[in-house]
Image: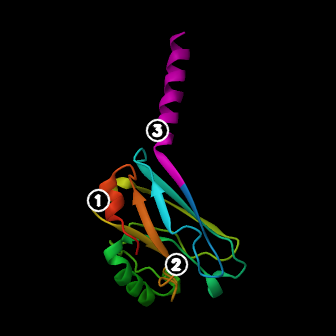
Amino acid sequence: MIKLVSATGLLLLARVAAADVCQVTIEATDQMRYDEQTLPVGSDCSEVEVTLRNTGKLPASAMGHDWVLTKTSDVSSVAAAGMSAGAANNYQKPGDKRIIASTKIIGGGESDTVRFSLGLLDPHESYSYFCSAPGHVSIMKGRFVYKPSSAASVAKNEPT
């Protein structure tokens, strides 16, 4: 009887722990667009798993996309540094501490997933995501809003 209760308790704890990981999917197209301009994440999440799906047809070399998360104030400088890093580095400067999370550049029909802790984010900051492929950041960007139940953090995350 004790073994049964212990096993049930462990399963319940595992289920609660898994609920702390929130999963978000965002799609990118050959028309250089994300399907979402705002990604809200609930205050009950401790980690986020973002899956980027490229719904286009073109290969990564012609119309590749990625998903990069930074402070809103860092978007332009991170994108510029990525241009210098080149395609071999997914247009992301290696070791750039301003990048909180990112996927690799993917082509049509492909997907990539990144998982990160919300503990990396400051609730008093504004965060944005963008595509770091050359020329894409001007229209492929959005805001990442976490703890949407907090009016202060939603208000701080103004559109980019």
| Residue pictured at 50% horizontal, 19% vertical | 6
Q: How is the image coloured?
A: rainbow
Instruction: Name above or below for residue 147 compared with residue 140.
Output: above
Instruction: Classify the position of the C terminus by image quarter.
Output: bottom left
Determine which residue is flagged by label 2. 140
Of the residues under marks 1 and 2, which one precedes in the sequence?
1
The x, y position of residue 118, in whole percent, is 38, 54
Determine which residue is flagged by label 1. 122
Nearest the viewer among 95 and 118 is 118
Mark 3 packing: few (<14 Cα in 10 Å), some, or many (20+)?
A: few
Mark 2 packing: few (<14 Cα in 10 Å), some, or many (20+)?
A: many
Mark 1 packing: few (<14 Cα in 10 Å), some, or many (20+)?
A: few
The mark lying in front, picked from 3 and 2, is 2
The mark lying in front, picked from 1 and 3, is 1
Q: Residue furthest top?
A: 1
Residue 7: say if magenta.
yes
Q: Main secondary structure of the magenta part?
A: helix
Image-quadrant location for residue 29: bottom right
Labelled disc at residue 17 = 3
Q: Which residues are magenta?
A: 1-23
The x, y position of residue 33, in whole percent, is 59, 77
**Is 13 on the left or on the right of 29, as rendered?**
left
| Residue pictured at 57% horizontal, 77% vertical | 65
**Is 133 on the left or on the right of 123, as rendered?**
right
